[in-house]
Amino acid sequence: MTTWIDASCILIVFLALTMLATYRIVGIIKIFAAQSFVLGLTPFFLHADGLTIRDIVIAMGTIVLKTAFVPFVLLWAMRHVSMRSEIKPIIGLGTSIVFGAMIIAGAFWVSLSLHLPGKPISDLMLPCSLSTVLLGFLIMVTRTRAVTQVLGYLVMENGIFLFTLSLFDVMPTLIEMGILLDIFVAVFIMAIIVNHINDEFERSPASVSRSKMGEAF
Amino acid sequence: MVSDVYLFIFNISISVENEMMMLILIILHWLIALLLSPFLLGVISKVKAFFAGRVGPSLFQPYYDLSKLFQKSAVYSQTTTWVFRAAPVVALASALLLVLVIPLGGLDAPLKFQGDIFLVAYILALARFFMIAASFDTGFSMEAMGASREAFFACLSELVLFMNFITLALLTRSISLSQMIGADSPLSWSHLGPTLLLVVASLFVVLLAENCRIPIDDPDTHLELTMIHEVMILDHSGVDLAYMTYAAALKFLIFATVLVPILSGWTGVFIKDMSIYITGLLGLAIVVGIVESSMARLRLNRVRNLLLIAFVLAFFGFIVTMWRG
């Protein structure tokens, strides 16, 4: 089972990296869905021997919410304001990828001196979760669109979830619930704001064209 | 004779009774590689035809093409010099030399010594240098453009290749390709699964890049502005073109041969290993065919990002290896 956990940790970081190298927001949303799916499966590998109904329900809830609902809302928001699907990065994609490599190296280096209580199930979980958090942060600060910033935040949250998984022996229900609530609120607020701004623009003079407006988000 | 050459170049001595075995091994290596490599290209085009809903050319079409080209004589432009004529020979010779460094299936590599991974990288670079020089030699600006792209992408893919070699060297504690991917390689998926996943993924991108397949380059396109490999051999004809095509086919086989043992591992039984190897090659050709039919060629300025991602994957694999100690 450790191999599976390791593989999913690595896949999560890899998918966060591919998000850094993707041009289209729709592509990033899809990759995020895939990453959340892998993350949702990780608790099953962690507690393969003693799965309770509660664990399964919470894990399934996480999967449904993060791989279906959140991407759906984001895609809906994108369609609704007919925004352009290209990201607007502050630094080039090549540079972001190289920064991503540095961040991974840094996360592994920092993990060397972090000693967590309890026995870790896999030694890759801590550095991989740190890498994911930092990669999410990188996405957030280097992409200017509202949707991409929310996506960066979501990736960060995925990293935090992985981190809590490595800390606790059981499914960290309370923490996960709190985080899920945060995401819920974040995505909703984003969708509502985007929608409202759109409505405002709708009423504004025709000089602000729809296509122009899309660039703001 | 063979042993003398070995002594001279690589400072490795082999006894006289081994000399005969060595010769047989070399000939077997060449036979397998030369017979198998065009078939893989046939498989790729068959898979592509299948996905396009066509019957497609026969699996043996590359052999027919090659035999037709071998019967024709080459035409040389008056502006070209000996460099242009040397390139096909160097390309094929270096591909044949590379085949000897790599263990094929259950067969040991005839040429092995500590550090032969550097030989692999630099022989690849030598062949590429001559091809680029030949394309400059024609004085055709489109070919020079293709050569410049080839040089740029090759720089990046060589970086990725070396990063992967470093990871494999750390895992196997050896810098000889025979020990990295040969019969006694200690690589196993049950222990090193995640790291090998990264190595395989990035080596696969290198395979696509080095062999000019989609998404890096489209081998079927004939638009001078976008092609890379095809535009470089545009002026070669007849036997020269056959050499170039054969060298390209061998190069695909060589990269696939590096990838297959990492994926499958060896059993130690010759027949089993050989069948695993050939199945692996065919499987890889099918995967490449599927990738080619499901993707479009990337815009030229985005190829760099793909190769950078492959590099980061290899680098990630290296970090995980270091982390595990």
Image (cartoon, grey):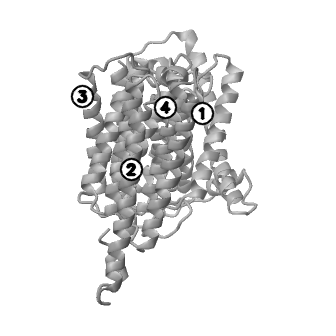
Q: Amino acid at mark 4?
A: Ala
Residue B39 in picture, x, y percent from top left: 67, 45
In the image, is A57 to the left or to the right of A187?
right
Q: Are marks 2 and 1 on the same chain?
A: no
Name the residue that disc number 4 marks: A7
Q: Check whether the beta carbons of the residues at disc 3 and disc 1 lie within 8 A of each other.
A: no
Element on which disc 3 rests: helix
**Label drawn at residue A183:** 2
Q: Are marks 4 and 1 on the same chain?
A: no
Quadrant where the N terminus of chain A sits is top right
B17 shown above or below B156: above
Element on which disc 2 rests: helix
Q: CA distance from mark 3 to mark 2?
A: 27 Å
Q: Check whether the beta carbons of the residues at disc 4 and disc 2 lie within 8 A of each other.
A: no
Is residue A139 visible from the viewing direction of this image? yes
A117 shown above or below A132: above
Residue B101 in picture, x, y percent from top left: 49, 28
Q: CA distance from mark 3 to mark 4?
A: 21 Å
Element on which disc 4 rests: helix
Judge depth for marks 4 and 2 and give the one in front.
Answer: 2
Name the residue that disc number 1 marks: B30
Q: Are marks 3 and 2 on the same chain?
A: yes
Name the residue that disc number 3 marks: A110
A157 shown above or below B53: above
Of mark 4 and mark 2, the one earlier in the sequence is 4
Of mark 3 and mark 4, the one earlier in the sequence is 4
- Residue at image position (53%, 24%) is A47
Q: Are marks 4 and 2 on the same chain?
A: yes
Q: CA distance from mark 4 to mark 1?
A: 38 Å
Q: Amino acid at mark 2?
A: Ile
Q: Amino acid at mark 1?
A: Trp
